Image (cartoon, coloured by chain):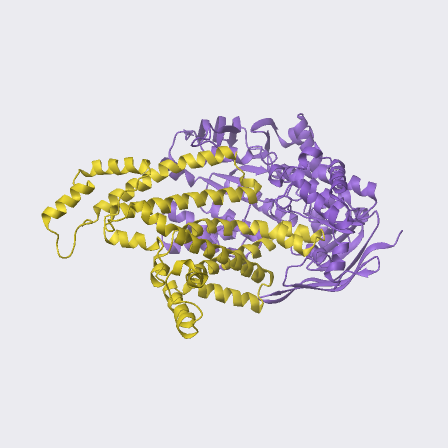
Chain colours: A yellow, B purple
Amino acid sequence: MLRYVLRRLLTAIPTLFVIVTISFFLMRVAPGGPFNQEKGLNPVIKANLERAFGLDLPLWKQYFVYLGNLLRGDFGPSYNLPDFTVAELFAAGLPISLQLGTAALVLSLVIGCAMGIYAALRQNSWIDYLVTAVATAGSTIPTFVIAPVYQIIFGLLLRWAPVGGWGDGTFANKIGPVITLALPFLAIFARLMRGSMIEALHTHHIRTARALGLSDYSIIVRHALRGALLPVVSYAGPAAAALLTGSIIVESIFQIPGVGRYFVDAALNRDYTLVMGTVVVIAIFTIAFNLIVDLLYAVLDPRVRYE
Amino acid sequence: MAEPILALKNIKVNFQTLDGIVEAVKGVSLDVKAGETVAIVGESGSGKSQLMMGTMGLLASNGSIAGVADYRGTNLVGLPKPELNSIRGRKITMIFQEPMTSLDPLYTIGNQLIEPIMHHQKIGWDQANARAIDMMKLVKIQEPERRMGSYPHEMSGGQRQRVMIAMALANDPDLLIADEPTTALDVTIQAEILELMASLQKRLGMGMIFITHDLNIVRRIASRVVVMRYGEVVEEGDAKAIFKQPKHAYTKALLDAEPSGRKAPPAAKAPKILDGTSVSVTFKIGGGFMAGPPLLLKAVDRVSVTLKQGQTIGIVGESGSGKSTLARALLRLVPSEGAISFEGKDIAKLDREEMRPLRKQIQIVLQDPFGSLSPRMTAGQIVTEGLLVHEPSMTSRKRDQRAVQALEEVQLDPKLRNRYPHEFSGGQRQRIAIARAIILKPRLIVLDEPTSALDRQVQSQIIELLRNLQKANNLSYLFISHDLAVVRAMADHIIVMKDGRVVEQGTPDEVLENPREPYTKRLMAAAFA
């Protein structure tokens, strides 16, 4: 098992390297640069700025300089927010996105799975239809609709929670963003869980368990649920990576200073270092959660245990 | 004799389907006494399984049961779940046809054995564990203590069925219901499991209901037989009497369906069709980035085969013996070493493109008539698909004529050619698969267990059809099967394979009447005992 983890961590290095390389050159293929402004910068100032950031070097040299810095843990300065380094921006924003993402992940997993299991046990009852309807709605209504509706109802009409802002992370400020983040994933978890649970309840070994006169609890929890969790787990990995690295829509609508906004803002402003930083962070999260999923799989299913 | 343990009276099982109510069991009565084995015999769809599933409260959610199932004074039909659960798994237990999937893949064997013991006998883990190990010994599993920690996927089908039996017997039941427990197993394993069940039944003095479609098994194990058809009992009585003097026409037909007849060998100077010399197939297992070198498995090890025109070679062996892989290698469907020639032409080195014109001459019919037919094509489209590849210039009119011809040859009504596979029975589907092969007028057909998934009666019809087609078109067959009774009726030369090697070969008389190798003897004993 430990050998397997080490092997997977080792293979993550070339994967990261390929991602960084491709993103670096893709970014540079896009026209424009960080110091192209509508008004047009004085060419002398622009040249000075570019020299200061090393952007006047040949591209391959810039690439190796960036790679060298990255290996030392230096993500470089942000071009558009020159008072901060990329690392400082993440140090400020990532904890906020992580908090919201973790809460949304736990919420969607717990409630989504519970709904799915309940619907599967009461297949074709009104509860089942209700869950299916909620799940369909949750995965089709976009977050940019859910968020403003929440703001209007709970922020403006009822005044139970603030409309937006982070407010030093008070509980009331987090409710809206967490619900908005969680809802689409909750819907998907509910649907996945329902489907795989129904399938699990129809397997031959469940028939064996019933023929042996085992209790409902044992049949449902011990024998059906464990196997039925596998598809949910494999979806939960990428879902966790997506939730924890922030969402541009939710963070923009609720005015949350997380890292979700960085990717799009930075890409539009050609803030090369910030884009690269975001790519690296998302890649690390994705690789890490995929590894966790594979390890969880091995815990749940002895047939995929690794040498 | 003693009071019956279980008495079924007028049991009816219905299923609510989209096409209305299906009556699976239409009022069946039977009883079982202690120490008695009752066999319920019938084809698939006769309702024999649903009768017992219903009695045990294991019907699918769209099923319902009516009638009386009297277990020692308690009616099992409509019994509340807690009370039913104190009887099933404790007093009445079941084992099923699918040993590969009937155990939970996520728990160890020991874990699964111990759970029902603790649950029913209300004893601690230590005692239950000791009892479980005793049960493992009882069903003759080697190294029971070590095997308790194994997962189902680490065991063979036969071993898993032994574990199922151990689970079923662990709480000293009065009655064991076995639903086709040996059907999915190789013949030699089948014989071992049957022997085990018979001896355990005698020792423990319980009653047994044995659901099967295989009359050979009934003959070996049952004291009383109930023959079912279309959800009703057509005949019932002492096993010996029924075999000697069946009263009902259907029982007679079942008994007559045992494969019979022999095939005459081809003329001595018949030309060679397919010639394989020292053919080997090696599979790589595992390996890859940082995982070390792969394991090499010799699935077929230097096997030589010569098939003449009009000849049928039967390839016999258990699963994993390499018989299917050998056939695939001879057809160049898997990479192999050794020399292979077809009609005198060396085909061992031909690539896919060069093989294509020859594919028309060589056709294959597979075991699973459902899985090998595309569900989204009509029978007519399936049958003529090969013509599109091999005779692309043919008009659609002409193709349709050929389809009608081919379907007539396999005795299937050509009017049915616009239907889809799921609208046909298993036997009809196999006829479609055969029509698809013969429409190209091949020289050689590989038949890979073509009758294993079929009921005996249908099986004998398909065998008859294959023999007639061979005679009419001078076809050569490579016939792969684990069923020696069928092979004896089909082949004029038999090859026995084990672990990728040929252990014995010769005419059916030489091999089957006078087996020399211990392995062949075991196969024989299992099939014809």
Q: Where does residue B2 sit, x and y in percent of width and height?
A: 89, 52
Q: Is residue A1 above or below residue A146?
A: above
Is any part of residue A96 visible from this angle?
yes
Q: Nearer the viewer, residue A7 or B313?
A: A7
Q: Residue at x 57, y 49 (%)?
A: A227
Is any part of residue B515 visible from this angle?
no
Report the side of A83 relative to B121 (left or right). left
Q: Where does residue A41 sit, x and y in percent of width and height?
A: 12, 52
Q: Where does residue A268 sit, x and y in percent of width and height?
A: 24, 54
Q: Nearer the viewer, residue A204 or A180?
A: A180
Q: State which quadrant residue B150 falls in.
A: top right
User: Which residue reaches farthest front?
Assistant: A168
Q: State which quadrant residue B183 falls in.
A: top right
Q: State which quadrant residue A26 falls in.
A: top left
Report the side of A39 relative to B279 (left or right). left
Q: Where does residue A299 sit, x and y in percent of width and height?
A: 55, 42
Q: Nearer the viewer, residue B302 or B357?
A: B302
